[in-house]
Amino acid sequence: MSQGISMSKLSIKTYGNRVLESKSRKVHTVDKEVKIFVKDMAEIMYEGRGVGLAAPQVGVLKRIIVFDPGNGLMCLINPEITWTRGREVMPEGCLSFPGVELEVKRHREIAVRALDLDGKSVEFKARDITARIIQHEVDHLDGVLIVDRVSRKKLKPIKEKLEELKKLSDKS
Ligand code: NI
């Protein structure tokens, strides 16, 4: 595959698609192509009524996430979690797992370092829902999914649902 990002026909990849289990690569230059891609990602996220989306969820293995905890759109490029405090279990969904909700344990507070859309380095603290979303999306960049964050016991009640998703998944 080329390094370029195809702008046409971005679609959400669902559980079962191998791209979701792959590790994304760092973005070297925040160029116009990246900016257009981020805009497309945000559109898809809002269309799906999601609060976060990571590039591999649309089949692009680059370390880019977008999210909106309810107070505006944010985009982080090459995000790294540099500090954590506390833990909390909360129900969580994912656009790649339609109809699935799982109780996931995450850090309550984090610090994150990343590049913004201007290519500038930023570092800030986040807590509660914002911290949860960022952790969830950064997991996607490492091929880690909500089903990897819970015990087998918690997966048991949704086993059939997961198999159904796998069957339906667009494997292209
Ligand atoms: Ni997700």
Image (tube, rainbow, N blue to C red):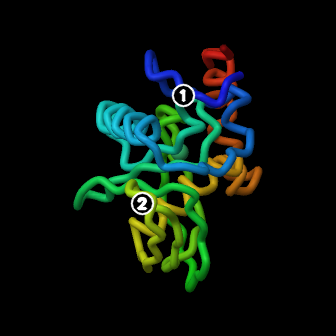
- Image point (30%, 38%), residue name: 46
Nearer to me, 17 or 10: 10
What is the spatial separation of the Cα atoms under label 2 and label 1, in whole angstroms?
19 Å
- Image point (58%, 81%), residue name: 84
- Image point (46%, 40%), residue name: 34
- Image point (50%, 27%), residue name: 12
Locate residue 96: give its quadrant.
Answer: top right
Residue 103 appears in the figure: no
Query: Residue 149: x and y, percent?
Result: 68, 56
Query: Residue 139: x and y, percent?
Result: 63, 55
Relative to 47, is 92 above or below? below
Nearer to me, 88 or 172: 172
First-in-chain label (2 vs 1): 1
Residue 122 relative to residue 78: left or right: left
Please give the residue where the numbered disc 1 appears in the rendered image: 5
* Element marked by disc 2: loop
Three-letter code for the amino acid on which mark 2 is drawn: Asp
Please give the residue where the numbered disc 2 appears in the rendered image: 116
Q: Farthest residue in the left direction?
A: 71
- Binning the other alpha carbons within 10 Å of mark 2 as few (below 14), some (14 to 19) or many (20 upward) gives some
Residue 42 appears in the figure: yes
Nearer to me, 119 or 84: 119
Relative to 143, is 81 above or below? below
Quarter of the image that includes the C terminus: top right
Quarter of the image that includes the N terminus: top right
- Ligand 1 within 8 angstroms of badge 2 C-beta: no
Q: Farthest residue in the bottom direction?
A: 85
Query: Residue 124: x and y, percent?
Result: 43, 78
Three-letter code for the amino acid on which mark 1 is drawn: Ile
Residue 165 relative to residue 72: left or right: right
Residue 15 relative to residue 42: left or right: right
